[in-house]
Image (cartoon, grey):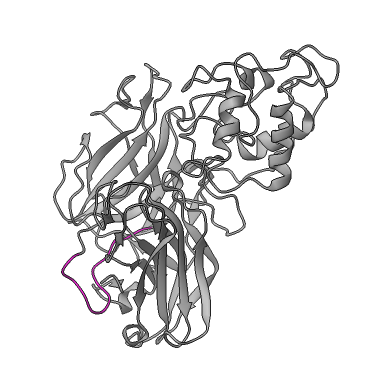
């Protein structure tokens, strides 16, 4: 999903790295981002509803599909609203090919597998280890049991009047920012929006290029996703590069080797605001920007025209602290064929961080692996490799299709002399070994960590990769 700077041949201390910040929830206890390119959210694989198996009975005596508003039993509706309708709403969004909003939606043929009812497909996806639903992790056992029982019973409808079980969420979008955004990067085709093809865009990456609109001292202080055609938008990533790009260009994504990660968004992500004394470096007037947008038009919509992207609030007078990204992880990836739970680790040693003149303040982590990635963890060993361990970020169920950032609130201090170990866990069911590389079929193991003050590191911003 991410094209990362070519990193070979550089070793030693902090090395030139990628720059990242990700649009997402600003607090660690807010809802994580979710993946919506899935067929359905549902129950256990033991539910074997088929096209002929959906019950016409109503649990409250009503007619199937016509009773009580949405026709879902209230306990089922509560689970569906909390885990599924963020994408599979009455109007599916973010590449979701079908609705799960009401009882009828669970009974129709699945768009992607019409030989199955949606409920039957959902029952498979909820336990799919490769592409689980919900993508943010295993559904709590109590919620799983509710859906499991309902699907096994044949998706009976209900006439009960259900209370809204959804929790209020913070407003998302440029209009909800506490500042006036003055910089935008959006999908385009000349002066118009980008027409997402009806065919061949089930998994389309399209790149849009821009000349830099910012000066050398300009910093980003807050940003928000611009969500235009939510039916087909899966996620986007904003890069910067010193390789000149056509201003206003659009085409296939041939990411330059020096592309640096700036910002990104996936469904469920919100607005982001840096602390009032921190600004994110943007690179100045001599860089170009690339907006990589992932489209998921599995419904083959013919009228999808999109101008999604990001709106940024910037300041020309630098704030007291400048944030940037350091890159942790390893290039030494060698995953044997048929390996399960195979670990690769990289250590940024304490002798390197001992050169820091002051602590680094870690604001957020963005773990990145490819399709074989199953688990991710970065630990801080206080005072060196043999010191006490503190976890910086732990993602026990990594999902390539739903990569998100993890805010550190409060900020985590990385002290001079601390060591950092990043461990990536892979399952390789294929018959060939897999090594490091930029292609999706290769693998990566990176944690892009947003820190301040970035200037104490200088230009060398990777550690422990070799």
The answer to which of 315 and 429 lies nearer the viewer is 429
Q: Where's residue 28, x and y in %?
A: 58, 59
* Quarter the C terminus occupies: bottom left
Looking at the image, which residue is at 15% across and 69% down?
A: 9
Looking at the image, which residue is at 55% across and 16% down?
A: 109
Q: Is residue 63 left or right of residue 436?
A: right
**Res 321 → quadrant:** bottom left
Q: Is residue 217 above or below residue 78?
A: below
Q: Main secondary structure of the magenta part?
A: loop
**Farthest residue toward the left?**
244
Residue 376 is one of the magenta-drawn residues: no
Q: Which residues are magenta?
A: 8-20
Q: Where's residue 409, x and y in %?
A: 56, 66
Q: Is residue 374 left or right of residue 127?
A: left
Residue 18 is one of the magenta-drawn residues: yes
**Res 194 → quadrant:** top left
Looking at the image, which residue is at 31% across and 60% down?
A: 19
């Amino acid at each position: 999903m991410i094209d990362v700077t070519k990193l070979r041949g550089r070793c030693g201390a902090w090395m030139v790295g990628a720059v990242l910040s990700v649009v997402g929830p600003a607090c660690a206890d807010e809802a994580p981002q979710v993946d919506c390119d899935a067929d359905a959210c549902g129950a256990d694989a033991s539910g074997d509803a088929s096209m002929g198996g959906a019950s016409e009975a109503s649990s409250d005596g009503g007619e199937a599909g016509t009773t009580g508003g949405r026709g879902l039993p209230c306990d089922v509706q509560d689970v569906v609203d909390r885990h599924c309708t963020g994408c599979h709403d009455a109007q599916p969004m973010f590449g979701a090919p079908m609705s799960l909003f009401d009882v009828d939606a669970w009974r129709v043929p699945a768009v992607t597998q019409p030989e199955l009812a949606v409920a039957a497909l959902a029952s498979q996806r909820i336990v799919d280890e490769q592409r689980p639903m919900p993508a943010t992790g295993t559904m709590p056992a109590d919620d799983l049991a509710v859906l499991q029982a309902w699907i096994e019973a044949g998706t009976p409808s209900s006439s009960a009047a259900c209370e809204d079980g959804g929790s209020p969420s913070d407003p998302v979008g440029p209009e909800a920012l506490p500042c006036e955004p003055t910089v935008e990067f959006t999908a385009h085709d000349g002066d118009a929006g980008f027409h997402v093809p009806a065919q061949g865009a089930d998994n389309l990456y399209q790149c849009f290029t821009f000349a830099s609109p910012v000066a050398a001292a300009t910093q980003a202080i807050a940003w928000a996703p611009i969500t235009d055609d939510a039916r087909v938008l899966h996620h986007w990533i904003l890069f910067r590069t010193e390789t000149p790009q056509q201003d206003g260009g659009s085409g296939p994504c041939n990411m330059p080797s020096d592309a640096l990660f700036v910002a990104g968004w996936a469904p469920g992500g919100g607005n982001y605001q840096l602390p009032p004394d921190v600004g994110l470096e943007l690179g100045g007037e001599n860089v170009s920007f690339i907006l990589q947008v992932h489209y998921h038009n599995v419904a083959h919509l013919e009228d999808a025209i999109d101008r999604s992207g990001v709106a940024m609030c910037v300041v020309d007078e630098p704030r007291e602290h400048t944030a940037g990204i350091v890159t942790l992880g390893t290039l030494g990836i060698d995953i044997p064929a048929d390996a399960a739970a195979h670990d690769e680790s990289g250590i940024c040693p304490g002798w390197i961080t001992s050169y820091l003149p002051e602590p680094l303040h870690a604001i957020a982590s963005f773990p990145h692996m490819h399709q074989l990635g199953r688990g991710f963890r970065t630990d801080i060993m206080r005072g060196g490799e043999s010191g006490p361990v503190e976890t910086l970020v732990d993602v026990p169920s990594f999902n390539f299709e739903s990569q998100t950032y993890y805010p550190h609130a409060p900020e985590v201090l990385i002290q001079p002399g601390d060591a950092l170990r990043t461990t990536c866990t892979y399952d390789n069911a294929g018959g060939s070994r897999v090594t490091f590389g930029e292609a999706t079929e290769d693998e990566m193991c990176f944690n892009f960590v947003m820190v301040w003050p970035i200037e104490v590191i200088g230009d060398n911003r990777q550690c422990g990769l070799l």
